[in-house]
Every structure is written in structure tokens, then in C-alpha cells.
Image (spheres, rainbow, N blue to C red):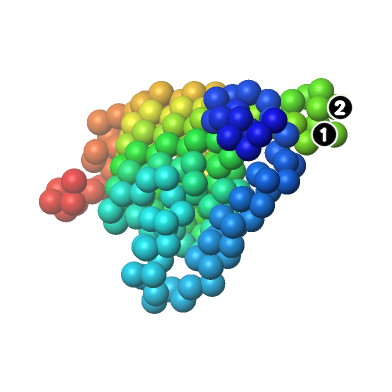
Amino acid sequence: MDLEEIKSRMLDGRLYFCNDASLCSEQLGMLDLVYEYNHLRPSAQNEKKALLKQMFAEIGDDCYIETPFYANWGGRHVHFGKGVYANFGLTLVDDGEIFVGDNVLFAPHVTLASGTHPIHPELRRKQAQYNLPIRIGNNVWIGACSVILPGVKIGDNSVIGAGSVVTKDIPADVVAAGNPCKILRPIAEKDRKYYAKNRVIEDLDMV
């Protein structure tokens, strides 16, 4: 199987062997860029922005990713909207495509895993893999240490609680948490009045 066929399979959900020598060589080049990004000083803002634009398939304005940052393919298959912020330890298993909307917040140590492996033991022994796209809407907040699994979609405005393992789609405008992640409640009118239990949002100019 030639390299272009393997790349096609990577993005359309078909099985392929991720240990192909040509594929691994190309991937190492992207991992070098991740290494370079992680070794830039925090004050090197312009250099970081330029490198992210080089690494990612798409990345909008006002995005920032704290270091350390990890990505199997250095962001090659990742599409970020504008205003995305990722705290320390974001991990992107971006062998397949990952789509993230505008104004999304990633708390520390979030993993987005588009890549996975078949259950069949012989296929796994041969390093067979397949990838399913992850899609995250606008204005989503993903809590610390959460894991988003292959093929999952998360709707606009939703909040994923810390430590969640998101195995199925989550609709828009809900709070969800747990392992496996489940909907806890809709985002309600009270969330526009209170920011933490009974603490009132006093400055209405903030919203």
C-alpha cells in the first residue's frame, strides 16, 4: 500500500498499519515541530503563533496552547476556530481529524483521541489502526483530565466536568460529567444569575 493510500485511510475511518516506514518518517518531522514548540520560552509569543500556524491544518486568531503540549501529528489534522485556549498538558491524538469551534476552553491535561485500534488481537499485533473524527462546537468548556474518545461530537456551549470520559455524543447547552460521561442537566436561567452555587453575578456588564 503506498503512502497516499495510507493517508486516505487515516482520514476516512478505514483500517491501516500505523507502523509504515514512510508514514513514520513523515510523522517524526511533525513531532520535531511539537518538540520545538514545547521548548520555546513563554515570552516567545510571536514565535509560538507562527509555529502553530505551520503545524495545524487550521488555527484561528487569538488561540493559545500552554506547554507542554502533545500531538501525534503535530496538529496536522486539527482544525481550531478563534479564541481557543488550552491549559497545560493538552494531548491531541490527531491521526484522524479533530474539529474545535470558537472560544473553546481546555482545562489542564485534556486528551482528544481520534485514533483507536481494532479489538482483533492479530490486527493489533500488526499495529492496525483506524481513526474517527472528533467535533467540538463553539463556546465549549472541557474540564481537567477529561478524555474525548474517537467519533464523539460535543454541541455548542456545553460543559464537560473534570475527569470525564466522553464515549458518546453530548448535545448543545448541557452540563455533562462522569465515566462514562452523562448529561447532568441543561444550562439554565440560573446559570445566567449565579456563577458558583449562590454567588451572584453582580457585574452584568460581564455577560
Question: Which residue corresponds to mark 1?
Answer: 126
Foreground of the two, 201 or 133: 133
- Name the residue furthest left: 205
Q: Residue at x 63, y 23 (%)?
A: 14
Q: Secondary structure at mark 1?
A: loop
Decide: is 69 above or below 23. Answer: below
| Visible residue check, residue 80 | yes
**Horizontal side of residue 144 vs 18, given as left or right:** left
**Depth order, front residue of 10/170:** 10
Question: Pointer 2: what residue?
Answer: 122
Q: Amino acid at mark 2?
A: Glu
Dot 2 and dot 1 residues touching (CB under 8 Å): yes
Q: Position of residue 26 (x, y in %)?
A: 61, 50
Residue in the picture at 49% in, 46% down: 76
Quadrant where the image shows the N terminus: top right
The residue tagged with tag 2: helix, strand or loop? helix
Image position of 168 with respect to 73: above or below: above
Label of residue 114 in the image: none
Q: Residue furthest front?
A: 2
Label 2 Cα neighbours within 10 Å, binned few <14 / some 14-19 / many ≥20: few
Q: Does residue 67 sit above or below 197 in this rendering? A: below
Expressed as whole percent of the image width and height from the top left, the position of residue 133 reads 51, 30
Q: Is residue 141 visible?
A: no
**Residue at figure coordinates x 66%, y 52% from the top left:** 25
Q: Judge by depth and name the residue closer to the eye, 103 or 76.
A: 76
The kind of residue tagged 1 is Lys
